[in-house]
Image (tube, grey):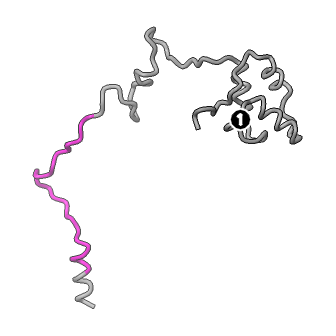
Amino acid sequence: MATTSKNMNVFYRQKKKSTTSTEKKSTKSPSPKHAATFGSDITQPPALVSHGGSLDLKDDFDEQEQVLRQFDMNMAYGPCVGITRVDRWERAQGMGLNPPKEIESLLKGGKVKLESLFDGRV
């Protein structure tokens, strides 16, 4: 049994902590100036700041598009990939899923995009 434990000590060799100054210095480069790290006082990276200095978080859609995007994300009316919003609404209506009438009026009004949120992205 003594030979087995001796072999195990060789196999799982432990490194002892040294107190000498021969330890290697870290070659890792310091974090960039505008890095978003824990404890950093920088709140936003420069990519989200517009030229005026305010946050550039506005999207190019209105409330109607927001409602339609919620319809796109709701899987209760079936998948939305590869089909227009109108076709999806009509398919859901035909299957008895009762999609909102507000969506139909927005789509038939003609002032919104007929492609779903995922069209061309998936």
- The residue nearer to you, when weighing 19 against 103, is 103
- Judge whether residue 12 is colored magenta: yes
- The residue nearer to you, when weighing 102 against 23, is 102
- The residue nearer to you, when weighing 23 against 85, is 85
Q: Quarter of the image holding residue 87?
A: top right
Which residue is drawn at the image coordinates 26% and 79% (left, top)? 8
Which residue is drawn at the image coordinates 70% and 37% (left, top)? 80
- Residue 63: x and y, percent? 71, 18
- Residue 37: x and y, percent? 39, 34
Q: Which residues are magenta?
A: 8-30
* Position of the N terminus by quadrant: bottom left
- Residue 106: x and y, percent? 79, 20
- The residue that mark 1 highlights is 83
In the picture, measured across the screen, residue 14 lies left or right of residue 100, that is left
Q: Quarter of the image holding residue 27?
A: top left
- Residue 34: x and y, percent? 35, 26
Q: Amino acid at mark 1?
A: Ile
Up/down of 73 relative to 66, above or below: below
Q: Main secondary structure of the magenta part?
A: loop
- The residue nearer to you, when weighing 92 against 54, is 92
Which residue is drawn at the image coordinates 78% and 22% (left, top)? 107
In the picture, measured across the screen, residue 70 lies left or right of residue 16, that is right
In the picture, measured across the screen, residue 105 lies left or right of residue 112, that is right
- Judge whether residue 72 is colored magenta: no
Up/down of 1 relative to 96, above or below: below
Label 1 secondary element: loop
